[in-house]
C-alpha cells in the first residue's frame, strides 16, 4: 500500500456548519468534499481547471475544487450545491434552472448553479454578455448554453421583482 | 385527438429528475460505492503500433495493497474479444497494441494511489511497428497492416445507369471534403464498477445500452442473461460515446481476478483514448443539367475507425446512406470504406456519418449553385425529395414534404429579406444554408411494463438510459396521458436489467418514438383493464365508461382507479400490470420498413469574416427540430440547441491531433470545446410539428438533427461573405486566412 503518513487537520465551515477533517497534503478539495464529507454534488471531470464541474464557492468565490489543495480552505467557508439546495433563499435560482430546461444530464449543473450564484451575488443585473463572460469557465456539453443564460436572466429578473 | 385534448403531452413540464440534479443528489456511476470495492488503474501502451514481446507484472503484484494485475495471460476460461459488429477488440491488448493508450494491463488495489503506483511497476517490452494514424498513411500500399489488412468494412449501393447519365449531363462537379477526428467530451468520463461473483456479475456503469452490455458480458463469461445485472445510474452525457460495450469487460475480468468488486473511473484523457468520432474523406461527383436538375451522383468515402472497429461498420454504411442528401437522383453510385488507423477507436457519435456526409454534400450543393448562377435555395427546392418519395431506393419513403419545413427556417432567419451589411471592407458578412434527411438507425425492439397501484399511482419500467435527453420525463408524460392520471402520480424506473424489461439501446434518436410507443401501449393496456373492471362494477360495457382525472365515470357516478384495483382484488391492495411490446410488426404498421423514420436537419447561418485574421464569428444560427409532435417542447429545443452547439465545435475548432500515432491533445486545454462565449449572437430552434412521425401522437426522434447541417451552413456563409470555399474542417482562423490569401493570388 502506498503510505502517506503526513496528515493535516483542516477545520473549516461547509454549508454553514463547522467541520474538522484529516487529509494528506496532496488531497484535492474535491476529494475531501466527495470522499471525506460525502458531498458528491461537486464532480470531477477535466481535472485541470477548465470545465467547472467541480466548482464550489470558497468565501463566496468560485474555485475549481480539482486543483485546490484541501488544506487551503482552513478557516474558510465553503459552499457546495448541497448547501444551495438546502437554502430556501436560493429557490429563485434553482427554480429558474429547472423551469428553463437548463439541466440535461446534470453533471455540470452543481458547478453551473454555484458559478451563477456567485455571479448574481456580485452583479444582480448582469447583461447577456456579462453572463457569458462570467460563466465561460463552466462547460456544459448538453444544453448549448442558451437555456442556462435564460435561466440566469430569469433568476435575476425574479430577484428584482421579489 | 386534437391538441386541446392533451393533459400533459405537449407541455414543457419540469423534468422529473430536476430536483435530483439541481441538488447534487443525483447518483452517477462516479458516485457509486460498492462495499469492499477495489480501485483500478490502466496500464496504457505508450506506442501506437507495436508487438508486445513480454509483460512482467511481478513487481506490481508484489506491492502491498495490490489485489490483481490483469494482462492477456489472465484472459482464460472466457472469450477474449468483444465488439458490436466485429469482435476484434481484446479485453486487454493481446500480442499487439494498435493505438497509443490501448490498455495493456490493469491493476486493482486497495486504493487509487496504490493502483497508480503499481501500474507504473508493470514492465512491458515492445517491438515498435510503423504507425499510420490517418487515412492517407493507412491506405498506402506498403502500410503496416493493423489487423489482417487496414480495410475494416466496405459498403455501397447503386441505382440507375450512372455512367450513361454522367455522359448526358451538361456539367459535372467533383469535390473532396475532409472531416476531422472529434471527441464527444461527455463530462462524466467512462466509469464502471463490477462485482464478479461465483454465479453472477453485477455491474454499475455509464452505459447507454445496458442490455447490449449484459449480452456481451454473458457471452464473454459464459453466463446466462439472468445472471448478469447491468445498472445504469444517471449518466453524465453520452452523445454516443457510451454506446455498446466499452470498459465493462475489462473491469469484469479484473474483478474476477481480484476476487472482489472493482471500480474503474477513467480520466478524461483515458476516455479520449476510448472512443471518438470517425474522421472522413468524402469525394462527390455530381452531374447536373444547366437548369439545375440533379441527374447523377457518385460518392466515394473513407472513414477512419481507428485501432479497432467499434461502430465502424455502421458508420461506414451510414455515411453512404446520408451523402446523397435530401434530393432526388435517378442515378446513384455510392461506395464507402472503413479504414483502420493507429488511433483511438471510433464509435457512435450523435448522427453517425451524418455530419461528415452533410459537410460534403451540402457544401457541394452551393458550389453547384454558384457555378450555374442559380440561387442555392432555389437549386435545393428544385431537386428536393417530396412526401412519399424514396429518397433512398428500397427504403421507407419520406414521411412529409421538406419544402414547407425549409421555408419555416428561412422565414425565421429572414433569408429572403437579408440585406448584407459589411462592417468594413475587410470584415465581411454572409449567409449560408444546409439541409439533409438522415435514416434513423433505430431498431424497433423495445418493451415496457406499467404497474398500476391500489392508490391510483403508477410505476413505469423502461430500459431507456437517462443520459440527459429527458427520456424519463417524456415517458412519464406519455404514461400520465394514457393512464388519465396526474404526472405527479407517475414514477419512472430505468436502466437496471434485473428490474426493467428489455430495450435495445438508447441512441439514434429512438427513445421517444420506440420506447414511447411501448410505454403508450403498456399504459393503454392498464387503462383497458381498468375499464373492464369498471364495466363490471357499473354493469355496463367498457366503451360506455369515461376515464379521466384518475376516475371511471358512468352516468354521473364515479369510482377512482385505485378503488377499481382494490375492488378487483377484494381487499386493500393488489395492482394491475400493463405491457407494451414494440417490434417491427407493431400494430401501428409503421415500423415494418427501414428506417423507422427520417430525421430532418435544416440550418441557416450568418457569419462575419475578418479577412485580415481569418476569424469567423457566428452571428446567427437558426436550426430546425422536427419532432412531428413535441411531447415536451423545451426539451426538444434543448436537444437541438445542444446538438447544434456540438457541431459549432467541430465546425470551428475541435480536432484530435495525431503525429506519428501519438495523440497530441488528449485534454481539455489542448482540445477546446465550445463555451458560453461561443454562443452565436442569435441562436434559434424552429419546432416543426406536422404529426408525421411513427411514434406516440405523431412524434419522431430529434436528438441528432441539430448536429448535421451546421458545418456546411457556416462554410456556405463564409463563401457568401468572401467568395472563398473551404473543404476541410475545422474552420480555424489559420485555415480560413490561408484560403483567403490563396484566393488573392
Image (tube, coloured by chain):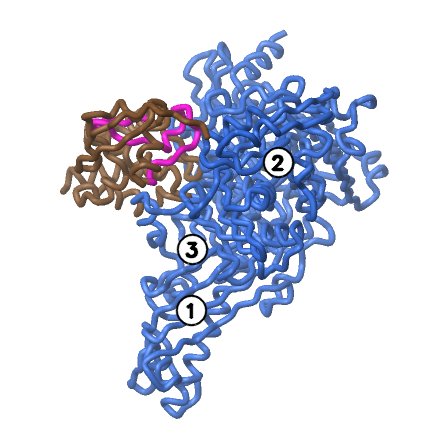
Q: Position of residue B449 (x, y in %)?
A: 49, 67
Quarter-wise, where is residue B121 in the image? top right
Distance from the alpha carbon under mark 1 to that under mark 2: 39 Å
Residue at 48%, 64% in the rendered image: B519
| Label whose residue precedes the other's in the sequence (2 or 3) | 2
Q: Earlier in the sequence, mark 1 or mark 2?
A: 2
Chain coloured blue: B
Where disc 3 sits, the SS reads helix
* Residue for point 49% across, 62% down: B499
Viewer-nearest residue: B477 or B213: B213
In this view of the protein, can residue B351 be seen by the observer?
no
Q: Nearer the viewer, mark 1 or mark 3?
A: 3
The residue located at (43%, 32%) in the rendering is A45
Is residue A106 shown to the viewer in this render? Answer: yes
**Mark 2 or 3, closer to the camera:** 3
Q: Which residue is mark 1?
A: B482
Subunit under mark 1: B
Q: Nearer the viewer, residue B132 or B416?
A: B132
Q: Which mark is residue B472?
A: 3
Q: CA distance from mark 2 to mark 3?
A: 31 Å
The N terminus of chain B, quarter of image: bottom left
**Position in image of residue B31 (x %, y %):** 40, 43
Q: State the residue position of label 2.
A: B358
User: What is the span of residues highlighted in magenta in the rendered image?
Assistant: A40-63
What secondary structure predominates along the stretch shown in magenta?
A: loop
**Residue at coordinates 36% horizontally, 51% vertically from top-left?**
B17
**Other residues around mark 3 within 10 Å, as few (<14) / some (14–19) / many (≥20):** many
Dot 2: element: helix
Q: Nearer the viewer, residue B567 or B653?
A: B567
Amino acid at each position: 500500500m502506498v503510505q502517506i503518513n503526513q496528515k493535516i487537520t483542516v477545520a473549516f465551515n461547509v454549508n454553514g456548519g463547522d467541520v474538522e477533517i484529516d487529509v494528506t497534503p496532496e488531497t484535492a478539495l474535491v476529494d475531501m468534499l466527495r470522499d471525506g464529507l460525502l458531498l458528491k454534488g461537486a464532480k470531477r471531470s477535466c481535472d485541470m481547471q477548465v470545465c467547472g464541474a467541480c466548482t464550489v464557492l470558497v468565501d463566496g468565490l468560485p474555485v475549481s475544487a480539482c486543483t485546490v489543495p484541501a488544506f487551503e480552505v482552513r478557516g474558510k467557508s465553503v459552499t457546495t450545491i448541497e448547501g444551495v439546495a438546502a437554502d430556501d433563499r436560493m429557490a429563485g435560482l434553482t427554480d429558474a434552472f429547472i423551469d428553463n430546461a437548463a439541466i440535461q444530464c446534470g453533471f455540470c449543473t452543481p458547478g453551473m448553479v454555484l458559478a451563477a450564484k456567485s455571479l448574481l451575488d456580485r452583479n444582480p443585473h448582469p447583461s447577456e454578455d456579462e453572463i457569458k463572460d462570467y460563466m465561460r469557465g463552466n462547460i456544459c456539453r448538453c444544453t448549448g448554453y442558451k437555456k442556462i443564460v435564460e435561466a440566469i436572466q430569469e433568476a435575476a429578473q425574479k430577484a428584482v421583482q421579489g | 385527438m386534437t391538441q386541446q385534448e392533451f393533459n400533459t403531452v405537449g407541455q414543457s413540464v419540469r423534468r422529473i429528475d430536476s430536483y435530483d440534479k439541481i441538488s447534487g443528489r443525483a447518483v452517477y456511476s462516479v458516485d457509486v460505492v460498492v462495499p469492499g470495492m477495489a480501485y483500478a488503474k490502466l496500464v496504457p501502451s505508450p506506442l501506437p503500433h507495436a508487438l508486445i514481446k513480454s509483460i512482467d507484472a511481478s513487481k506490481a503484484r508484489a506491492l502491498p495493497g495490490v489485489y490483481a494485475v490483469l494482462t492477456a495471460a489472465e484472459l482464460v476460461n472466457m472469450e477474449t474479444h468483444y465488439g458490436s459488429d466485429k469482435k476484434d477488440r481484446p479485453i486487454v491488448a493481446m500480442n499487439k497494441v494498435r493505438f497509443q493508450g490501448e490498455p495493456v494491463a490493469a491493476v486493482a488495489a486497495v486504493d487509487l494511489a496504490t493502483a497508480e503506483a503499481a501500474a507504473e511497476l508493470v514492465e512491458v517490452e515492445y517491438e515498435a511497428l510503423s504507425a499510420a494514424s490517418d487515412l492517407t498513411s493507412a491506405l498506402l500500399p506498403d502500410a503496416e497492416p493493423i489487423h489482417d489488412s487496414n480495410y475494416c468494412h466496405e459498403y455501397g449501393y447503386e441505382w440507375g445507369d450512372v455512367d450513361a447519365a454522367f455522359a448526358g449531363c451538361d456539367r459535372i462537379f467533383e469535390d473532396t471534403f475532409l472531416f476531422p477526428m472529434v471527441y464527444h467530451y461527455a463530462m462524466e468520463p467512462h466509469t464502471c464498477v463490477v462485482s464478479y461473483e461465483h454465479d453472477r456479475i453485477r455491474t454499475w456503469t455509464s452505459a447507454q445500452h445496458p442490455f447490449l452490455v449484459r449480452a456481451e458480458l454473458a457471452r464473454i463469461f459464459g453466463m446466462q442473461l439472468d445472471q448478469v445485472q447491468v445498472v445504469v445510474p444517471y449518466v453524465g452525457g453520452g452523445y454516443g460515446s457510451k454506446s455498446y460495450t466499452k470498459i465493462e469487460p475489462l473491469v469484469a475480468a479484473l474483478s474476477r481476478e481480484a476476487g472482489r468488486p472493482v471500480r474503474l473511473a477513467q480520466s478524461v484523457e483515458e476516455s479520449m483514448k476510448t472512443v471518438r468520432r470517425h474522421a472522413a474523406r468524402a469525394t462527390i461527383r455530381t452531374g447536373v443539367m444547366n437548369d439545375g436538375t440533379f441527374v447523377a451522383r457518385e460518392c466515394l468515402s473513407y472513414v477512419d475507425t481507428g485501432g479497432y472497429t467499434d461502430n465502424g461498420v455502421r458508420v461506414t454504411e451510414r455515411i453512404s446512406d446520408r451523402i446523397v442528401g435530401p434530393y432526388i437522383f435517378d442515378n446513384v453510385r455510392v461506395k464507402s470504406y472503413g479504414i483502420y488507423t493507429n488511433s483511438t477507436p471510433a464509435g457512435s457519435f450523435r448522427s453517425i456519418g451524418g455530419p461528415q456526409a452533410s459537410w460534403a454534400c451540402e457544401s457541394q450543393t452551393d458550389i453547384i449553385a454558384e457555378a450555374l448562377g442559380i440561387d442555392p435555395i432555389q437549386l435545393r427546392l428544385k431537386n428536393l425529395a417530396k412526401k412519399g418519395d424514396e429518397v433512398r431506393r428500397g427504403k421507407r419513403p419520406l414521411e412529409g414534404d421538406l419544402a414547407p419545413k425549409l421555408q419555416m427556417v428561412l422565414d425565421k432567419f429572414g433569408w429572403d429579406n437579408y440585406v448584407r451589411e459589411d462592417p468594413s471592407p475587410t470584415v465581411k458578412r454572409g449567409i449560408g444554408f444546409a439541409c439533409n434527411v438522415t435514416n434513423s438507425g433505430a431498431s424497433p425492439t423495445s418493451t415496457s411494463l406499467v404497474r398500476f397501484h391500489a392508490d391510483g399511482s403508477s410505476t413505469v419500467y423502461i430500459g431507456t438510459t437517462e443520459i440527459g435527453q429527458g427520456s424519463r420525463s417524456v415517458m412519464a408524460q406519455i404514461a400520465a396521458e394514457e393512464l388519465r392520471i396526474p404526472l405527479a402520480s407517475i414514477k419512472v424506473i430505468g436502466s437496471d436489467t434485473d428490474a426493467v424489461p428489455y430495450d435495445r439501446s438508447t441512441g439514434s434518436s429512438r427513445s421517444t418514438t420506440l420506447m414511447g410507443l411501448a410505454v403508450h401501449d403498456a399504459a393503454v393496456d392498464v387503462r383497458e383493464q381498468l375499464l373492464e373492471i369498471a364495466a363490471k362494477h357499473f354493469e355496463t360495457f367498457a366503451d360506455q365508461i369515461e376515464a379521466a382525472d384518475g376516475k371511471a365515470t358512468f352516468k354521473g357516478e364515479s369510482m377512482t382507479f385505485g378503488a377499481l384495483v382494490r375492488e378487483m382484488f377484494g381487499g386493500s391492495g393488489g395492482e394491475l400490470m400493463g405491457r407494451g411490446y414494440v417490434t417491427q410488426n407493431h400494430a401501428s404498421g409503421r415500423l415494418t420498413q427501414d428506417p423507422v423514420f427520417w430525421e430532418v436537419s435544416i440550418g441557416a447561418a450568418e457569419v462575419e469574416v475578418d479577412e485580415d485574421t481569418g476569424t469567423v464569428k457566428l452571428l446567427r444560427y437558426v436550426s430546425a427540430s422536427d419532432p412531428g409532435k413535441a411531447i415536451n417542447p423545451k426539451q426538444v429545443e434543448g436537444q437541438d440547441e445542444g446538438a447544434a452547439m456540438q457541431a459549432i465545435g467541430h465546425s470551428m475548432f475541435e480536432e484530435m491531433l495525431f503525429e506519428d500515432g501519438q495523440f497530441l491533445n488528449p485534454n481539455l486545454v489542448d482540445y477546446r470545446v465550445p463555451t458560453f462565449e461561443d454562443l452565436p449572437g442569435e441562436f434559434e430552434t424552429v419546432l416543426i410539428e406536422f404529426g408525421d412521425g411513427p411514434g406516440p401522437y405523431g412524434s419522431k426522434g430529434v436528438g441528432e438533427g441539430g448536429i448535421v447541417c451546421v458545418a456546411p451552413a457556416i462554410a456556405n456563409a463564409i463563401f457568401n461573405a468572401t467568395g472563398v470555399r473551404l473543404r476541410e474542417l475545422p474552420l480555424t482562423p489559420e485555415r480560413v486566412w490561408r484560403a483567403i490569401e490563396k484566393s488573392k493570388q
